[in-house]
Image (tube, coloured by chain):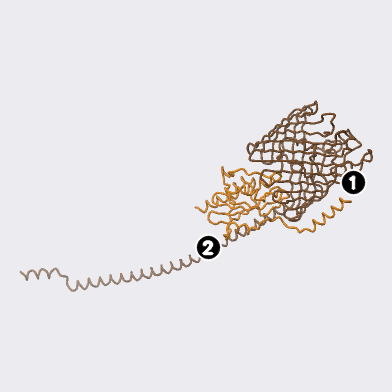
Chain colours: A brown, B orange
């Protein structure tokens, strides 16, 4: 049985030759696999070398790119700096000489006047010679057209050199506006209420008023400002015109055009602006002789005069209030030309309300009298105005006001329309 | 004769006085007071919607392509120029969190309106922030005779507040 079993098993076992053949085949497979493995190893090492090389190249490229980006940023910064410097230089060069201006068109629909008038066309020119030396001027065409027989005038209202000799003090020499009242110095149409400038500042101060001379201005303490000016004086025409014209302060302005300089004048002002929204001001002026030496011709001595103007301006939020009082104290010799002209005064009160950036309302009541010393008759002029400003832009304004003026038995009522700009 | 003599003396006295530019505070001093140790300056490009907002606030483009600022945490400082009437006013503004901490006039070159440099005016801006859009949450009372300078300082304060907000928003991203 056992023999049979062993015999059967021997028949299933491969022969030695078969085993050798199998061994040979397996050996060949192993050799092939080894070869493949070596090839793969070589390829892997090649790939690693290439990867490493590429990594190195990428690192190099990245560093180069980073350097390029940094350079580009630096170049952009440098370019922007250069452009900004050019812009600044251009602005500074351009801003050494400046042009500005303002203008206003008025329509008057009054009992005694139905008129349209481009009242003022003004150009400002200024030039800065250095940080502390500058020139300022204002050239005005009044009533649109000037020349022989025309209604208008071309006027040089300011032309002075300003020397800022310290942070808080400056000197002006030339032709400048008198530092008196509100409107004489600041009269761009978008800065005040009412189509026309108010009659008190027009007739008593008299706005717009400029003279030639030398002026100092500056600050004594925060909010405490001063003006001190020595300048040409007024000249009344004592020989021609009506009595009221011969003693009219407004008619006495010679506008520094071949003006007489026999007698001089001085103006001082202290102005307090130490609280935001508040301005308090007191101006005093002395005129040596309103006739400029012509008084002998009419058989009197010279006519000296003093002017006092006090004003208050307070703006708080939208509410505003302006008040002004002006008075001339004139040598009573002037009464020989026009009785009562030694006293001339005016005042007004002007509450206002700025509803928003665009709209503002105002009311003004004022009185003035240019022969207040005349006790024989009532020569006082009373006027009220009620109106609206509409600012289309902070520098462009449309205006409407209603007015009523009473003068001893006569009255003038009506309304005014206006548009003004400033740049 | 007396007038002539006074004029002559006045001229002599004035010309003998030293001249100086109207620089009230150097930029570095302003920054040192604001931060103590002054951080490195950074720049903000005025482009896209920022450029448009700047135009809306000032009423015109700003005078340069970028503005420089200094930042430490949520506090920024800005030194900006704006023309009042004719000449640029250099204004320093410090903004912290969402409100103006201080406004200082560093240099003033206009012929009028110098009162804006005083604390009685600039203190009005302390604590101011935006109320609606880019409007300040309080009225700024002006100075009679200095209207254009007041407007310039007010506009630049609004501008600094706006730019500050943009810088902080970009930092939070």
* Nearest to the observer: residue B89 or residue B11: B11
Q: Name above or below for residue A280 compared with residue A373.
A: below
- Counting from the top left corner in percent of width and height, residue A143 is at 79, 37
> How many numbered discs sit on the rendered protein?
2
* Category of crowding for the residue at label 2, using alpha-carbon neighbours closer than 10 angstroms: few (below 14), some (14–19), many (at least 20): few
- Counting from the top left corner in percent of width and height, residue A51 is at 43, 66
Give residue A403's quadrant in the image. Answer: top right
Chain of the residue displaying label 2? A
Q: Residue most toward the front?
A: A375
Instruction: Tell me the element at label 2.
Output: helix
**Of the two numbered discs 1 and 2 in the rendering, the one whose residue sits closer to the viewer:** 1
Q: Which mark is residue A66?
A: 2
For mark 1, what is the residue? A262
Instruction: Tell me the element at label 1.
Output: loop
Answer with left or right where residue A75 lies relative to residue A23: right
- Counting from the top left corner in percent of width and height, residue A344 is at 82, 36
Asked if marks 1 and 2 fall on the same chain, the answer is yes
Whether pointer 1 and pointer 2 mark residues with C-beta atoms closer than 8 Å, the reply is no
Q: Name above or below for residue B152 compared with residue A325.
A: below
* Category of crowding for the residue at label 1, using alpha-carbon neighbours closer than 10 angstroms: few (below 14), some (14–19), many (at least 20): some
Answer with left or right where residue B101 lies relative to residue A199: left
* Nearest to the observer: residue A377 or residue A39: A377
Give residue A206's quadrant in the image. Answer: top right
Chain of the residue displaying label 1? A
Q: Which mark is residue B143?
A: none
- In whole angstroms, how far apart are the C-alphas of marks 1 and 2? 81 Å
Answer with left or right where residue B82 lies relative to residue A114: left
- Counting from the top left corner in percent of width and height, residue B23 is at 69, 56
Q: Going from the N terminus, do you reach mark 1 or mark 2 first?
A: 2
Q: Name above or below for residue A387 compared with residue A54.
A: above
Q: Residue most toward the left?
A: A1
């Amino acid at each position: 049985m056992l023999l049979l079993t062993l015999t059967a098993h021997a028949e299933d076992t491969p022969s030695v030759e078969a085993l050798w053949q199998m061994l040979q085949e397996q050996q060949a497979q192993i050799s092939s696999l080894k070869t493949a493995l070596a090839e793969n190893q070589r390829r892997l090492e090649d790939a690693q070398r290439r990867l490493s090389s590429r990594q190195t190249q990428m690192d190099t490229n990245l560093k180069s790119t980073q350097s390029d980006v940094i350079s580009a940023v630096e170049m952009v910064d440098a370019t922007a700096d250069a452009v900004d410097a050019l812009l600044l230089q251009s602005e500074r060069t351009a801003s050494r000489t400046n042009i500005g201006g303002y203008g206003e068109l008025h329509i008057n629909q009054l009992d005694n006047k139905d008129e349209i008038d481009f009242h003022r066309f003004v150009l400002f020119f200024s030039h800065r010679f250095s940080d502390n030396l500058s020139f300022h001027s204002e050239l005005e065409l009044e009533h649109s057209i000037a020349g022989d027989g025309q209604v208008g005038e071309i006027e040089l209202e300011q032309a002075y050199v300003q020397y800022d000799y310290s942070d808080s003090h400056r000197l002006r020499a030339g032709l400048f506006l008198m530092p008196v009242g509100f409107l004489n110095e600041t009269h761009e149409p978008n800065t005040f209420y009412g189509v026309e400038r108010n009659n008190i500042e027009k007739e008593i101060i008299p706005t717009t008023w400029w003279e030639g001379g030398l002026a100092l201005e500056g600050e004594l303490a925060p909010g405490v400002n001063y003006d001190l000016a020595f300048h040409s004086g007024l000249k009344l025409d004592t020989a021609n015109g009506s009595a009221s014209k011969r003693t009219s302060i407004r008619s006495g302005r010679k506008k520094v055009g071949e003006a007489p300089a026999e007698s001089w004048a001085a103006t001082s002002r202290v102005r307090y602006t130490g609280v935001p929204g508040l301005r308090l001001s007191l101006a005093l002026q002395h005129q040596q002789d309103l006739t400029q030496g012509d008084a002998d011709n009419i058989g009197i001595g010279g006519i000296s005069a003093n002017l006092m103007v006090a004003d208050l301006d307070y703006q708080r939020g939208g509410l505003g209030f302006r008040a002004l009082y002006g008075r001339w104290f004139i040598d009573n010799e002037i009464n020989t030309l026009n009785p009562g002209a030694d006293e001339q005064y005016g005042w007004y009160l002007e509450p206002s309300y700025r509803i928003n950036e665009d709209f503002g309302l105002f009311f003004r009541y004022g009185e003035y009298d240019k022969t207040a010393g005349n006790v024989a008759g009532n020569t006082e002029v009373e006027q009220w105005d009620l109106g609206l400003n509409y600012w289309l832009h902070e520098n462009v304004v449309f205006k409407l006001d209603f007015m009523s003026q009473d003068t001893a038995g006569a009255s003038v009522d009506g309304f005014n329309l206006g548009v003004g700009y400033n740049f | 004769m007396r007038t002539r003599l006074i004029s002559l003396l006045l001229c002599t006295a004035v010309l003998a006085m030293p001249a100086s530019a109207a620089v009230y505070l150097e930029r570095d001093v302003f920054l040192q007071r604001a931060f103590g140790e002054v951080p490195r300056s950074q720049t903000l490009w005025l482009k896209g919607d920022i450029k448009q907002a700047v135009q809306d606030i000032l009423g015109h483009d700003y005078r340069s392509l970028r503005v420089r600022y200094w930042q430490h945490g949520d506090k920024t400082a800005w030194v900006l120029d704006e023309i009042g009437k004719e000449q640029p006013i250099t204004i320093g503004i410090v903004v912290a969190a969402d409100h103006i901490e201080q406004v200082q006039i560093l240099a003033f070159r206009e012929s009028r309106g110098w009162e804006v440099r005083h604390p009685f005016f600039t203190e009005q801006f302390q604590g101011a922030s935006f109320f609606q859009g880019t409007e300040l949450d309080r009225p700024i009372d002006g100075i009679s005779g200095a209207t254009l300078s007041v407007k310039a300082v007010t506009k630049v304060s609004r501008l600094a507040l706006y730019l500050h907000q943009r810088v902080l928003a970009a930092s939070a991203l």
